[in-house]
Amino acid sequence: MQRRGSRFEVRGKNAVAMCALAAAGLLAGCRQDMHDQPKFFPQRGTEFYADGRSVRPQVENTVARGQLHEDNYYYTGMQNGKEGNAMPFPVTMEVLQRGQERFNIYCTPCHSRVGNGAGMIVQRGYRPAGNFHTPRLMAAPIGHFFNVMTNGYGAMPDYAAQLKPEDRWAVVAYIKALQLSQNAKTADAAPGAQIDSLSSLAEREGLPPNFANEWVLPKTAVYGTPNNQDNGIPQALSPNGKSPTPMGAAASPEPTNGKPQ
């Protein structure tokens, strides 16, 4: 007598048969149009277009989203091919605070907190940075600083990727404030404002007596040269144009055997 399979075996066989039937139906309806469709490879030729190029030229006068830059001065700092000398928007306390924040992040390693070009990496032997308090940069138009941050200048790379245009202008405003801070006169203060000397402020804050001394570039080795005067790079003058004097607490150690400590 032949033994029939259990009902579980019968159900299993039916399920397998149905799956096989469904798979066959799917395979029968699957076509290779998506796989074999005409397509272009970058930088390869094609017979589809008359000029033989697969990459199509941009439509004339097309501007990418976010790149209109209709206000040319705002994005370049240039007017009629020359560096302009005006801010493209009003300078408020918020703008100065933003400029100070960005300056302290990106500029102080080379230019220092006071903008004298003696930042920490310069004190450790890197090439001296620009001193914002020299006569040349004091007289430079506002657009010059924006242009330098946008395109770089000399050994300084551009900072267009780190600073958006609005922030570059904010840094420019703060640089002008730094220049004023190091060359301010009593007459520049508002009427009735209390005026204290830096030495008095330093004393009240518990800072060393030489904190308010005039500053100069430190005598550290630059690219293996014993000191800055030996490599053709002049030392910076103090803000009032006098001869350099020691930096006091801000000075780096004197070289030992021709090498920076």
Image: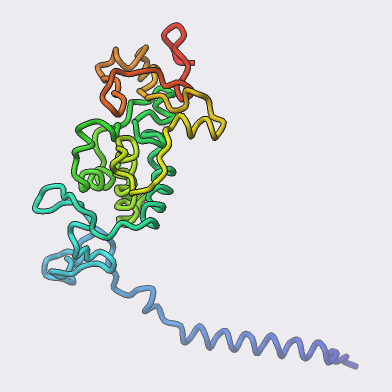
Q: Nearer the viewer, residue 21 or 140?
A: 140
Residue 192 at x, y percent in the picture = 37, 48
Q: Is residue 74 above or below residue 138?
A: below
Q: Is residue 10 above or below residue 212?
A: below
Q: In the rendered image, which quarter is residue 13 located in? A: bottom right
Number of marks in picture: 0
Extreme residue in the left direction: 80
Residue at the image position 8 percent from the left and 53 percent from the top = 80
Quarter of the image for the N terminus: give it: bottom right
Residue at the image position 37 percent from the left and 50 percent from the top = 99
Q: Is residue 11 above or below residue 255?
A: below
Extreme residue in the top direction: 257
Residue 209 at x, y percent in the picture = 50, 23
Residue at the image position 26 percent from the left and 19 percent from the top = 234
Is 48 placed left or right of 242 in the picture? left
Q: In the rendered image, which quarter is residue 68 located in? A: bottom left
Q: Nearer the viewer, residue 141 or 149?
A: 141
Is 225 placed left or right of 58 in the picture? right
Is 52 placed left or right of 22 in the picture? left
Residue at the image position 20 percent from the left and 62 percent from the top = 45
Residue 166 at x, y percent in the picture = 32, 57
Residue 180 at x, y percent in the picture = 30, 40
Q: Is residue 147 above or below residue 93?
A: above
Is 137 placed left or right of 107 in the picture? left
